[in-house]
Image: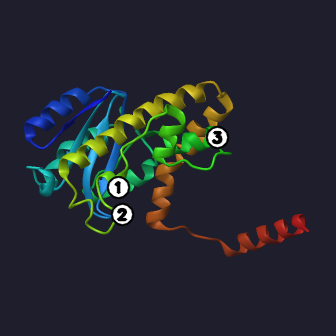
Amino acid sequence: DWTFEAVKTEVDFSNLLTKVKGVETLVVDTETDDLYGPIVGISLAINGKHGWYIPTVKEHGMELPLEKIADLLRPILEDSKIGKIGHNIKYDLTILEQLNIELKPIAFDTMIAAYVLGAHLRSFDFDSCAARELNYTSIPLDAIVKKPIKPSAILLADGAKLAEYAAEDAIVTFRLYEHYAKALNKEPTLKKVAESMDFPLIPVLRTMEKRGILVDESVLSKINTKLSGEIT
């Protein structure tokens, strides 16, 4: 009940950018070769019915150099008027730094929303959320690559199958966004927590990961003493 397009040429990009221009929200998802490895592709969706997959490697049919892809995508992925959505979007934010793209602004994270609305639940990964909230069974990764997944497995996977798998991720993430946004609207207190604290902290946490943090040992010592006294 969904469709997708693979974006591999300048004409493809032109059509994509025309359709994305002016939207309010955009789901962004990345595929990598191994965890935090080189980027292999990017999937996008502006609704829960259609998506796009952009392979970033020639092995999967991309006709443009990586620098050109980045230059074409940067205007929309950094557009301050388009809210970016993802499932664990801090990961995608991190991966897109490989292309010197600052993914912003972060509007919604479906993984975080799932936790805010159901902290008592045990799993918040994409497949679990899709099954639990949408009764949707997503394409399993082992349908694309065999387990155990080794470095370069994604790069060596069938490009057409990976495109379908990745596009589905973006499309279903948009459906999860619609579901969780509606649920948060019914819980004003939780919505305030998510929108004023959790979502805005995503890029802050990424900056902390990159730069590190400065710790005042004397202040920590005082806190330790105070908490130890309260516990005992």
**Which secondary structure lies at badge 1?**
helix
* Residue denoted by label 2: 147
2 or 1: tag closer to the N-terminus:
1
> How many C-alpha atoms fall within 10 Å of the one at disc 3: few (<14), some, or many (≥20)?
few
Residue 201: image location, x then y, percent: 53, 49
Q: CA distance from mark 2 to mark 3?
A: 31 Å
**Residue 199, horizontal then vertical, whole percent:** 52, 43
Residue 70 lies left or right of residue 30; in this view the side is left
Camera-side residue: 159 or 23?
159
Q: Residue 142 got which mark?
A: 1
Amino acid found under the numbered disc labelled 3:
Gly
Task: Please tell me in which quadrant of the rendered image residue 188 appears.
Answer: top right
Q: Position of residue 104 (x, y in %)?
A: 38, 43
Count of labels shown? 3
* Residue on which the image places disc 3: 118
Q: Dot 1: few (<14), some (14–19), or many (≥20) neighbours within 10 Å?
A: few
Which of marks 3 and 2 precedes in the sequence? 3
Q: Mark 2 or mark 3, which is nearer to you?
A: 2
Location of the N terminus by quadrant is top left
Q: Is residue 217 left or right of residue 58?
A: right
